Amino acid sequence: MKTIPMNIALDRRKPVAAQRDRLRTSHRWLHELLNRGVALLREWRHRARSRAELATLDERMLRDIGVTRADVWRETSKPFWRQ
């Protein structure tokens, strides 16, 4: 049976560890990308719902919050992806 010196055995593991670290980094990057995508979709949905709700308010409610019908039209005519 042939014995392998410890320093050579450890050197063989370095490429595997480096590959594992690269894989973890790419997984973190992908996870972050997916999280940002989900957050963006939630924000768009929130905007669409808020604008739809704003459009349903009557004149008295609009006056209470200090918004005119022109402000409502301007806000509700925006696409959901615009702030």
Image (spheres, rainbow, N blue to C red):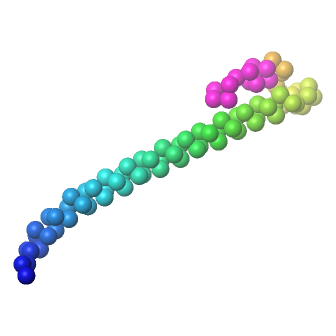
Q: Residue at x 9, y 74 (%)?
A: 4
Q: Relative to 30, does residue 61 appear above or below in the rendering?
A: above
Image quadrant in which the C terminus is located: top right
Q: Is residue 13 visible?
A: yes
Tell me residue 64's x, y (percent). Answer: 88, 31
Q: In the rendered image, which quarter is residue 58 located in?
A: top right
Instruction: Say which of 54 and 7 sits in front.
Output: 7
- Please give the name of the residue rendered at 63% of the width and 29% of the height, measured from the top-left corner: 81
Considering every residue shown, the one lying at the far bottom of the view is: 1
**Residue 67 shown in magenta:** no
Query: Which residue is rendered at x = 83% and y = 21% of the image?
Result: 68
Of residues 71 and 21, the one drawn nearer to the viewer in this rendering: 21
Which residues fall within the magenta stretch? Answer: 71-82
The answer to whether any part of residue 83 appears in the image is: no
For residue 34, side relative to residue 69 (left or right):
left
Q: Residue furthest front?
A: 1
Q: Is residue 53 left or right of residue 12?
A: right
- Left or right side of 49 for 3: left
Q: Nearer the viewer, residue 72 or 52?
A: 52
Residue 75 lies in the magenta stretch: yes
Please tell me in which quadrant of the rendered image residue 49 appears: top right
Q: Quadrant of residue 78?
A: top right
Identify the residue at horizontal 8%, vertical 78% (top origin): 3
Q: Position of residue 56 (x, y in %)?
A: 87, 30
Looking at the rendered structure, the number of numbered marks drawn on it comes to 0
Which of the image's four quarters has the N terminus? Answer: bottom left
Asked if residue 62 is positioned above or below residue 23 in the image, the reply reads: above
